[in-house]
Image (spheres, rainbow, N blue to C red):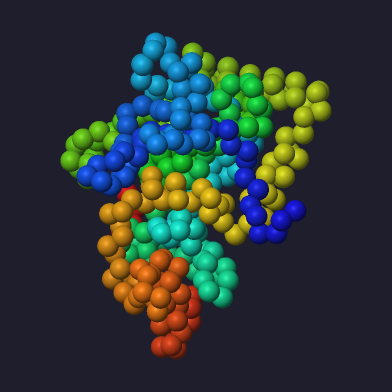
Amino acid sequence: MLKGLALTPPAIGRIAIGKVVEKNGKRLPEKDDSFTITSQVQNKDGWVNHPMNESLRKEPNAKLRAIAVRLLFDDPELNLRANYSLFDRQTGRPMCVGNGDTCRRSLAAGVQTLPCPSPEACELAKGGFCKPYGRLNVRIGQDDELGSFVFRTTGFNSIRTLAARLSYFHAVSGGHLSTLPLELRLRGKSTTQSHRAPIYYVDLTVQTGMTMAEAIASARAECEIRKAAGFDQVALDEAARQGFAAGAFEESEEDGPAVVEEFYPDEFDSADGAFGTTTPTNGTKPGLADKLNQKAALMNGHGAPVNQISRQGSNGRE
Protein backbone atom coordinates (compact mmCIF):
# COMPACT_ATOMS: atom_id res chain seq x y z
CA MET A 1 0.00 0.00 0.00
CA LEU A 2 1.17 3.55 -0.73
CA LYS A 3 2.91 5.15 2.23
CA GLY A 4 1.60 8.44 3.57
CA LEU A 5 -1.87 7.97 2.04
CA ALA A 6 -4.79 8.23 4.48
CA LEU A 7 -7.44 5.60 3.78
CA THR A 8 -10.78 7.32 4.33
CA PRO A 9 -14.28 5.78 4.19
CA PRO A 10 -15.45 5.28 0.58
CA ALA A 11 -17.70 8.22 -0.26
CA ILE A 12 -20.54 8.00 -2.78
CA GLY A 13 -21.97 11.46 -2.19
CA ARG A 14 -22.12 14.65 -0.12
CA ILE A 15 -24.58 16.21 2.32
CA ALA A 16 -24.59 20.00 2.29
CA ILE A 17 -26.54 22.86 3.90
CA GLY A 18 -25.37 25.40 1.36
CA LYS A 19 -23.69 25.84 -1.99
CA VAL A 20 -21.16 27.97 -3.82
CA VAL A 21 -22.67 30.71 -5.98
CA GLU A 22 -21.17 33.39 -8.26
CA LYS A 23 -21.61 36.99 -7.11
CA ASN A 24 -19.95 39.97 -8.78
CA GLY A 25 -17.54 37.68 -10.57
CA LYS A 26 -16.55 35.80 -7.39
CA ARG A 27 -17.54 32.32 -6.30
CA LEU A 28 -18.70 32.52 -2.68
CA PRO A 29 -20.37 30.10 -0.26
CA GLU A 30 -24.07 30.65 0.45
CA LYS A 31 -25.85 29.04 3.42
CA ASP A 32 -29.20 27.27 3.04
CA ASP A 33 -32.06 26.27 5.35
CA SER A 34 -32.33 22.69 4.08
CA PHE A 35 -30.18 19.69 3.21
CA THR A 36 -29.00 18.94 -0.31
CA ILE A 37 -27.65 15.49 -1.18
CA THR A 38 -25.24 15.57 -4.09
CA SER A 39 -23.09 13.17 -6.03
CA GLN A 40 -19.32 13.68 -6.22
CA VAL A 41 -19.58 15.10 -9.74
CA GLN A 42 -19.52 18.81 -10.58
CA ASN A 43 -20.58 20.67 -13.71
CA LYS A 44 -20.59 24.38 -14.58
CA ASP A 45 -23.56 24.93 -12.24
CA GLY A 46 -21.97 23.18 -9.24
CA TRP A 47 -22.41 19.77 -7.65
CA VAL A 48 -24.81 17.41 -9.44
CA ASN A 49 -27.62 16.26 -7.17
CA HIS A 50 -27.77 12.62 -6.13
CA PRO A 51 -31.01 10.76 -6.99
CA MET A 52 -31.71 10.50 -3.25
CA ASN A 53 -31.94 14.28 -3.09
CA GLU A 54 -35.43 14.04 -4.61
CA SER A 55 -36.50 10.57 -3.51
CA LEU A 56 -36.18 11.45 0.20
CA ARG A 57 -38.45 14.49 -0.04
CA LYS A 58 -42.07 14.00 1.00
CA GLU A 59 -43.22 16.24 -1.84
CA PRO A 60 -41.43 17.52 -4.97
CA ASN A 61 -39.29 20.57 -4.18
CA ALA A 62 -40.12 20.33 -0.46
CA LYS A 63 -37.32 21.35 1.89
CA LEU A 64 -35.29 18.39 3.17
CA ARG A 65 -34.67 18.98 6.87
CA ALA A 66 -34.33 15.41 8.18
CA ILE A 67 -32.49 12.38 6.77
CA ALA A 68 -32.65 8.84 8.19
CA VAL A 69 -29.07 7.57 8.53
CA ARG A 70 -26.90 4.81 9.97
CA LEU A 71 -23.26 5.11 11.00
CA LEU A 72 -20.34 3.09 9.68
CA PHE A 73 -18.47 2.62 12.95
CA ASP A 74 -19.07 2.07 16.65
CA ASP A 75 -16.25 4.43 17.64
CA PRO A 76 -17.61 8.03 17.74
CA GLU A 77 -14.28 9.53 16.66
CA LEU A 78 -14.18 7.41 13.52
CA ASN A 79 -17.60 8.63 12.41
CA LEU A 80 -16.83 12.32 13.13
CA ARG A 81 -13.32 13.66 12.74
CA ALA A 82 -12.96 17.26 13.89
CA ASN A 83 -9.83 19.38 14.17
CA TYR A 84 -8.45 22.83 13.52
CA SER A 85 -7.43 22.94 9.86
CA LEU A 86 -5.36 25.34 7.80
CA PHE A 87 -5.37 25.08 3.99
CA ASP A 88 -3.32 26.80 1.30
CA ARG A 89 -5.94 28.77 -0.65
CA GLN A 90 -3.92 28.72 -3.87
CA THR A 91 -3.35 24.96 -4.06
CA GLY A 92 -5.99 23.51 -1.71
CA ARG A 93 -3.27 21.58 0.11
CA PRO A 94 -3.79 20.96 3.84
CA MET A 95 -0.98 22.77 5.64
CA CYS A 96 -1.67 22.33 9.36
CA VAL A 97 -4.09 20.14 11.33
CA GLY A 98 -4.34 20.33 15.11
CA ASN A 99 -6.54 19.44 18.07
CA GLY A 100 -5.70 22.31 20.45
CA ASP A 101 -2.83 20.31 21.97
CA THR A 102 -0.60 19.19 19.11
CA CYS A 103 -0.67 19.72 15.35
CA ARG A 104 0.85 18.27 12.18
CA ARG A 105 2.26 21.03 9.98
CA SER A 106 3.65 20.78 6.46
CA LEU A 107 6.91 22.71 6.15
CA ALA A 108 9.83 22.67 3.72
CA ALA A 109 11.58 20.22 6.05
CA GLY A 110 8.58 17.86 5.92
CA VAL A 111 5.56 17.26 8.12
CA GLN A 112 6.38 18.12 11.73
CA THR A 113 4.48 17.61 14.99
CA LEU A 114 4.26 20.87 16.93
CA PRO A 115 2.22 22.39 19.78
CA CYS A 116 -1.28 23.61 18.83
CA PRO A 117 -2.68 26.43 20.98
CA SER A 118 -5.99 26.60 18.96
CA PRO A 119 -6.75 29.40 16.47
CA GLU A 120 -7.40 32.09 19.10
CA ALA A 121 -3.83 31.90 20.40
CA CYS A 122 -1.92 30.87 17.27
CA GLU A 123 -0.03 33.55 15.36
CA LEU A 124 -0.19 31.52 12.16
CA ALA A 125 -4.00 31.43 12.38
CA LYS A 126 -4.46 35.21 12.26
CA GLY A 127 -7.00 36.40 9.72
CA GLY A 128 -9.30 33.39 9.85
CA PHE A 129 -7.12 30.98 7.89
CA CYS A 130 -7.55 28.26 10.52
CA LYS A 131 -11.01 26.95 11.48
CA PRO A 132 -12.63 24.04 13.27
CA TYR A 133 -13.29 21.58 10.43
CA GLY A 134 -15.42 18.45 10.81
CA ARG A 135 -16.26 15.50 8.57
CA LEU A 136 -19.15 13.15 9.38
CA ASN A 137 -19.65 9.95 7.37
CA VAL A 138 -23.13 8.40 7.34
CA ARG A 139 -24.98 5.71 5.43
CA ILE A 140 -28.21 6.56 3.63
CA GLY A 141 -30.32 3.64 2.43
CA GLN A 142 -29.28 0.01 2.14
CA ASP A 143 -27.63 -0.10 -1.31
CA ASP A 144 -24.02 0.09 -0.06
CA GLU A 145 -23.33 -0.86 3.55
CA LEU A 146 -19.72 0.33 3.41
CA GLY A 147 -20.31 3.40 1.24
CA SER A 148 -21.08 6.73 2.85
CA PHE A 149 -22.21 10.29 2.33
CA VAL A 150 -19.95 12.98 3.80
CA PHE A 151 -21.18 16.04 5.66
CA ARG A 152 -18.42 18.65 5.95
CA THR A 153 -18.67 21.71 8.16
CA THR A 154 -16.64 24.48 9.74
CA GLY A 155 -19.60 25.46 11.93
CA PHE A 156 -18.81 25.21 15.62
CA ASN A 157 -22.47 24.58 16.50
CA SER A 158 -22.68 21.53 14.20
CA ILE A 159 -19.34 20.11 15.33
CA ARG A 160 -20.07 20.51 19.04
CA THR A 161 -23.62 19.14 18.76
CA LEU A 162 -22.65 16.12 16.65
CA ALA A 163 -19.69 15.26 18.89
CA ALA A 164 -21.89 15.41 22.00
CA ARG A 165 -24.66 13.33 20.45
CA LEU A 166 -22.26 10.64 19.25
CA SER A 167 -20.68 10.41 22.67
CA TYR A 168 -24.07 10.15 24.39
CA PHE A 169 -25.51 7.62 21.94
CA HIS A 170 -22.37 5.49 22.26
CA ALA A 171 -22.75 5.50 26.05
CA VAL A 172 -26.48 4.74 26.32
CA SER A 173 -26.49 2.06 23.58
CA GLY A 174 -23.58 0.09 25.03
CA GLY A 175 -21.38 1.04 22.09
CA HIS A 176 -23.78 -0.04 19.31
CA LEU A 177 -23.50 3.13 17.24
CA SER A 178 -23.25 1.38 13.87
CA THR A 179 -26.66 -0.29 14.19
CA LEU A 180 -28.54 2.52 15.92
CA PRO A 181 -31.37 3.98 13.75
CA LEU A 182 -30.54 7.70 13.65
CA GLU A 183 -31.59 10.85 11.86
CA LEU A 184 -29.73 13.98 10.79
CA ARG A 185 -31.81 17.05 11.53
CA LEU A 186 -31.35 20.67 10.58
CA ARG A 187 -31.94 23.08 13.43
CA GLY A 188 -31.93 26.87 13.61
CA LYS A 189 -30.92 29.36 16.28
CA SER A 190 -30.32 33.09 16.59
CA THR A 191 -27.49 34.80 18.43
CA THR A 192 -26.33 38.36 18.98
CA GLN A 193 -23.40 37.63 16.65
CA SER A 194 -25.85 36.67 13.88
CA HIS A 195 -27.77 39.93 14.55
CA ARG A 196 -30.73 37.71 15.50
CA ALA A 197 -30.94 36.25 12.01
CA PRO A 198 -31.35 32.46 12.03
CA ILE A 199 -28.25 30.33 11.59
CA TYR A 200 -28.56 26.62 10.84
CA TYR A 201 -26.64 23.68 12.21
CA VAL A 202 -26.88 19.89 12.08
CA ASP A 203 -28.08 17.68 14.91
CA LEU A 204 -28.28 13.89 15.29
CA THR A 205 -31.26 12.17 16.94
CA VAL A 206 -32.98 8.79 16.97
CA GLN A 207 -35.25 8.32 13.99
CA THR A 208 -38.64 10.01 14.04
CA GLY A 209 -41.36 7.85 15.60
CA MET A 210 -38.97 5.88 17.82
CA THR A 211 -38.20 6.26 21.50
CA MET A 212 -34.65 5.93 22.77
CA ALA A 213 -35.49 2.53 24.28
CA GLU A 214 -36.92 1.28 20.97
CA ALA A 215 -33.88 2.52 19.05
CA ILE A 216 -31.48 0.77 21.45
CA ALA A 217 -33.47 -2.48 21.27
CA SER A 218 -33.37 -2.28 17.47
CA ALA A 219 -29.61 -1.65 17.52
CA ARG A 220 -28.93 -4.64 19.77
CA ALA A 221 -31.11 -6.93 17.64
CA GLU A 222 -29.40 -5.77 14.45
CA CYS A 223 -26.01 -6.33 16.06
CA GLU A 224 -26.89 -9.95 16.85
CA ILE A 225 -28.06 -10.53 13.26
CA ARG A 226 -24.79 -9.15 11.94
CA LYS A 227 -22.71 -11.29 14.29
CA ALA A 228 -24.63 -14.41 13.23
CA ALA A 229 -23.85 -13.56 9.60
CA GLY A 230 -20.14 -13.18 10.40
CA PHE A 231 -19.98 -9.37 10.21
CA ASP A 232 -17.02 -8.24 12.35
CA GLN A 233 -17.65 -4.65 13.43
CA VAL A 234 -14.64 -4.56 15.76
CA ALA A 235 -12.33 -5.45 12.86
CA LEU A 236 -13.98 -2.84 10.63
CA ASP A 237 -13.40 -0.12 13.22
CA GLU A 238 -9.76 -1.14 13.60
CA ALA A 239 -9.24 -1.14 9.81
CA ALA A 240 -10.68 2.39 9.64
CA ARG A 241 -8.52 3.52 12.55
CA GLN A 242 -5.37 2.28 10.85
CA GLY A 243 -6.47 3.81 7.54
CA PHE A 244 -6.89 7.29 9.01
CA ALA A 245 -3.51 7.00 10.75
CA ALA A 246 -1.72 6.02 7.52
CA GLY A 247 -1.52 9.62 6.26
CA ALA A 248 -0.49 12.94 7.76
CA PHE A 249 -3.68 14.63 6.51
CA GLU A 250 -7.13 13.23 5.78
CA GLU A 251 -8.00 15.67 2.98
CA SER A 252 -6.24 15.02 -0.33
CA GLU A 253 -4.86 17.66 -2.71
CA GLU A 254 -7.55 16.53 -5.15
CA ASP A 255 -10.41 17.37 -2.75
CA GLY A 256 -8.72 20.35 -1.12
CA PRO A 257 -9.64 23.06 -3.68
CA ALA A 258 -13.37 22.29 -3.36
CA VAL A 259 -13.10 22.38 0.45
CA VAL A 260 -11.26 25.71 0.33
CA GLU A 261 -13.80 27.24 -2.05
CA GLU A 262 -16.76 26.27 0.13
CA PHE A 263 -15.37 26.71 3.64
CA TYR A 264 -12.35 29.06 3.34
CA PRO A 265 -13.59 31.84 1.03
CA ASP A 266 -11.60 34.73 -0.47
CA GLU A 267 -12.45 37.11 2.35
CA PHE A 268 -9.55 35.63 4.34
CA ASP A 269 -6.93 36.21 1.63
CA SER A 270 -6.15 39.73 2.82
CA ALA A 271 -4.54 38.57 6.06
CA ASP A 272 -0.97 38.67 4.76
CA GLY A 273 0.06 40.63 7.84
CA ALA A 274 -0.02 37.45 9.89
CA PHE A 275 2.65 35.85 7.74
CA GLY A 276 4.67 38.68 6.18
CA THR A 277 4.45 39.82 2.55
CA THR A 278 7.72 38.76 0.98
CA THR A 279 7.21 37.76 -2.66
CA PRO A 280 9.09 34.69 -3.99
CA THR A 281 11.93 35.35 -6.40
CA ASN A 282 9.85 34.07 -9.34
CA GLY A 283 7.49 37.06 -8.89
CA THR A 284 4.38 35.02 -8.16
CA LYS A 285 2.05 35.71 -5.24
CA PRO A 286 3.24 33.74 -2.19
CA GLY A 287 1.07 30.81 -1.21
CA LEU A 288 0.39 29.76 2.36
CA ALA A 289 3.18 27.19 2.20
CA ASP A 290 5.65 29.99 1.37
CA LYS A 291 4.36 32.05 4.28
CA LEU A 292 4.57 29.19 6.77
CA ASN A 293 8.12 28.39 5.71
CA GLN A 294 9.04 32.09 5.79
CA LYS A 295 7.65 32.34 9.33
CA ALA A 296 9.57 29.24 10.41
CA ALA A 297 12.78 30.64 8.93
CA LEU A 298 12.30 34.00 10.67
CA MET A 299 11.70 32.35 14.01
CA ASN A 300 14.79 30.15 13.60
CA GLY A 301 16.82 33.20 12.58
CA HIS A 302 15.94 34.92 15.85
CA GLY A 303 16.95 31.93 17.90
CA ALA A 304 13.40 30.77 18.63
CA PRO A 305 12.44 27.15 18.06
CA VAL A 306 10.17 26.39 15.10
CA ASN A 307 7.51 25.00 17.42
CA GLN A 308 7.28 28.18 19.52
CA ILE A 309 3.92 29.74 18.72
CA SER A 310 2.84 33.18 19.88
CA ARG A 311 -0.11 33.38 22.23
CA GLN A 312 -1.28 36.55 20.51
CA GLY A 313 -3.75 36.01 17.65
CA SER A 314 -7.21 36.83 16.42
CA ASN A 315 -10.25 34.63 16.77
CA GLY A 316 -10.41 32.23 13.82
CA ARG A 317 -13.72 30.60 14.66
CA GLU A 318 -16.94 31.16 12.84
Above/below status of 242 relative to 165: below
Which of these two is toward me, 283 or 318? 283
Q: How many marks?
A: 0
Is residue 267 toward the left or the right of residue 95 in the image?
left
Name the quadrant containing residue 172: top right
Which residue appears at 50% of the width and 35% of the height? 41
Which of these two is toward me, 208 or 249? 249
Extreme left residue here? 195
Extreme top residue here? 59
Which residue appears at 29% of the width and 64% of the height? 271
Is residue 194 toward the left or the right of residue 88 in the image?
left
Which residue appears at 35% of the width and 39% of the height? 20
Name the quadrant containing residue 245: bottom right
Q: Residue 96 in the image: x percent, y percent? A: 48, 62
Above/below status of 267 relative to 20: below
**From where the camera sits, is residue 122 visible?**
no
Above/below status of 274 relative to 86: below
Q: Residue 33 in the image: x percent, y percent? A: 32, 29
Is residue 15 toward the left or the right of residue 29 in the image?
right
Q: Residue 23 in the image: x percent, y percent? A: 24, 42
Which residue appears at 29% of the width and 36% of the height? 199
Above/below status of 245 relative to 24: below
Which of these two is toward me, 247 or 199? 247
**From where the camera sits, is residue 259 visible?**
yes
Name the quadrant containing residue 189: top left
Q: Residue 2 in the image: x percent, y percent? A: 71, 56
